[in-house]
Image (cartoon, helix red, strand yellow):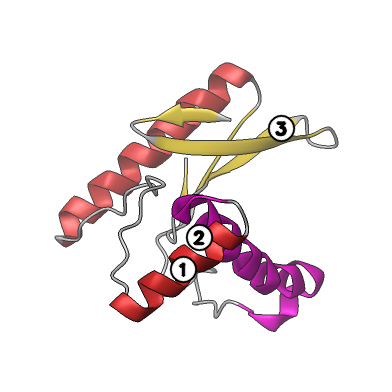
């Protein structure tokens, strides 16, 4: 993983092309980068993120920010009580219980998507990018 301006990029090495390829995680928008060396990869990430931020500014859109890991929930008092009871019964704090239960639910959604990527195909525009996403390659 490499980071730039709070955005985290993950990458892999393709030995057939002798090229590192990566993408920024924790965003709905898609930002891709690549390089033939680690230094080139880092520079490509910087250019891709800066380009993404520039395009957002030009369009008058707010750039998506990486997820912080903090999420505020509003629960009705009955649900709040039920969550507290369930957490106590499992020997966990409310936060730990919610993290576990939500994580399990998210995994239940991700599992079939990983097994069969055709469940949620992305619509492609003529340029090959998703119509909703800003695809950046530097």
Q: Are marks 2 and 1 in contact (CB under 8 Å)?
A: yes
Determine the CA span between mark 1 and mark 3: 48 Å
Quadrant of the image occupied by residue 90:
bottom right
Is residue 120 in the magenta section? yes
Residue 62 position in % (x across, y down): 20, 57
Residue pointed to by mark 1? 83
Please name which of the two marks, 2 or 1, marks the residue nearer to the observer.
1
In the image, the segment drawn in magenta is 92-121
Residue pointed to by mark 3? 19
Q: Does dot 3 land on a helix, a strand or a loop?
A: strand
Q: Does dot 1 land on a helix, a strand or a loop?
A: helix
Residue pointed to by mark 2? 98
Residue 109 position in % (x across, y down): 65, 73
The answer to whether residue 73 is above or below residue 118 is above
What is the crowding at mark 2: few (fewer than 14 residues within 10 Å), some, or many (at least 20)? some
SS majority, magenta? helix
The answer to whether residue 6 is above or below residue 77 is above
Q: Are marks 2 and 3 in contact (CB under 8 Å)?
A: no
Residue lying at 39% horizontally and 77% vertically, measured from the top left:
79
């Amino acid at each position: 993983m490499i980071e730039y301006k709070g955005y985290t990029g993950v990458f892999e090495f393709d030995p057939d092309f002798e090229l590192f390829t990566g993408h920024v995680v924790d965003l709905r928008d898609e930002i891709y980068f690549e390089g033939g060396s680690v230094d080139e990869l880092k520079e490509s990430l910087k250019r891709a993120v800066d380009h993404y931020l520039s395009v957002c500014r030009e369009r008058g859109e707010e750039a998506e920010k990486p997820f912080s890991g903090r999420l505020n929930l509003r629960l009705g008092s009955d649900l709040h009580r039920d969550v507290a009871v369930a957490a106590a019964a499992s020997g966990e704090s409310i936060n730990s219980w919610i993290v576990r239960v939500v994580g399990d639910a998210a995994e239940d959604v991700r599992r079939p998507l990983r097994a069969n990527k055709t469940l949620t195909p992305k619509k492609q525009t003529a340029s090959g990018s998703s119509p909703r996403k800003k695809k950046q390659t530097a």
